[in-house]
Image (cartoon, grey):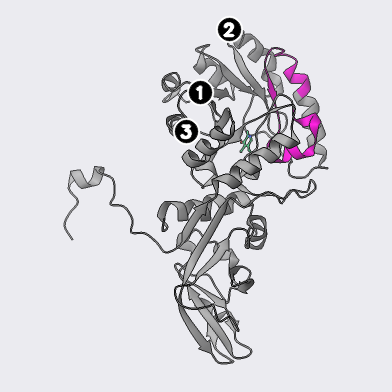
Amino acid sequence: MTAATPDSATSPPAREPRRLARLTVDHAAIVENWRFFKKQAPNAAVSAVVKADAYGLGSIGASRALAQAGARVFFTATHGEAVLVRKALGEGPQIFVLNGPTAEDVGAFASAKLTPILNSMAQIKLWDARAPAGLHIDTGMNRLGIGPEELTDSVRALKDVSLAIVMSHLACASEVKHEMNALQLKRFVDAATLFPKAPRSLASTGGVLIGPDYHFDLVRPGVGLYGSGGLDADNPKLNAAATIEAPILQVRDVLPGETFGYGATFTAAQKMRTATVGLGYADGYLRSLSTRGYGFLAGAKRPILGRVSMDLIILDVTGCDDAQPGAMVEFLGPNAPLDDIAALAGTAPYEILTTFAGTVRKTGVR
Ligand SMILES: *Cc1c(COP(=O)(O)O)cnc(C)c1O
């Protein structure tokens, strides 16, 4: 090995060779899901939350498709994410930055016409009445936002700022009947009266589904746009936005008593046919899906045998003639639904999207 020169230390790394899994993003499905929220909240504007690279699916493609369908308001988490979305969309749409400005990026909001959400007295001071901003009021999540004891000060500090929105965020929106929802609703209504001219926004995906009392002027669905319908409000049928497939590398016939993979955690009780697939936790496929997850092939779920390893998974394909090297197996999509995979992995659909879809998007076959 040669020592790294200063040049090679600062230049970007060579692009990773493509891995074997393939992500397909269905932008029409994202648009259809957005229209579902428009039907649910007919009296509110429906924005699109595209933070974290549109939950791993690619914020540029998702934002463009949604803008074309009529979305006029977008939310990112950071200034950097918002700059990318602005480049993709051009001048028209409004782009809010949920995490607000930092000392480093506060001067760069104006040139891309980005609107920060101000989440603290410190951010209000930093913004210093430069241009329109949003205000986040904390109503019980204790994560970001102006607390009850700071409300009066914030009214004074914001007297010269045009407020594009006053918002809060629900802690338990995915549980329609949770008592936090009504409590936060009341606190939000009370606090928002201090800013009578500002449009109001409270609901994320779950909040839209709780009901019209939660809609106000603008709703902010995120995960629902990307196909999570596993919320307990009427269990809406949202469309799968991401499909991930990976190829079978080998097929084996295995005798009773044989074991599979690291730790030999699964033993064949009878003769089996197995398929080794080129997918693993290096692709963001969670190891917690070992012995619990499945791939979908030729009309049926094919259970994972033993542990997920770095680049490989073993499936039970007994009796499946379509299981041949090169055949593609679906691990996320219409036949391996996001909410189902998240439940089996013991996590939230958000993490499946950002970790699995996000990783395959960056490194997988296109
Ligand atoms: C992420 C986020 C949303 C979107 O939430 P989903 O549950 O994905 O719909 C809305 N508002 C805020 C403040 C958020 O952080």
Please state which of residues 342 and 250 is positioned toward the viewer in this rendering. 250
Report helix, strand or loop for mark 2. loop
Assign ligand 1 to one image quadrant: top right
Q: Are marks 1 and 3 in contact (CB under 8 Å)?
A: no
Q: Which amino acid, by three-letter code, is at mark 1? A: Gly
Calculate the distance from the C-alpha at mark 2 to the C-alpha at mark 1. 24 Å
| Residue 140 placement (x, y as % from top left) | 72, 32
- On the rendered structure, is 226 left or right of 58? right
Q: Residue at x 50, y 17 (%)?
A: 126
Q: In this orientation, does residue 98 appear?
A: no
Q: Which residue is mark 1?
A: 92
Residue 200, magenta (yes or no) = yes
Magenta part of the chain: 189-215
Residue 116, magenta (yes or no) = no
Q: Residue at x 59, y 91 (%)?
A: 271
Report helix, strand or loop for mark 1. loop
- On the rendered structure, is 92 left or right of 135? left
Calculate the distance from the C-alpha at mark 1 to the C-alpha at mark 3. 11 Å
Which tag is nearer the camera, tag 2 or tag 1? Answer: 1
Which tag is nearer the camera, tag 3 or tag 2? Answer: 3
Q: Which mark is residue 160?
A: 2
Report helix, strand or loop for mark 3. helix
The N terminus sits in image quarter = bottom left
- Above or below, comparing residue 289 to residue 162 in the picture: below
Give whichever of discs 2 and 1 has the lower sequence position.
1
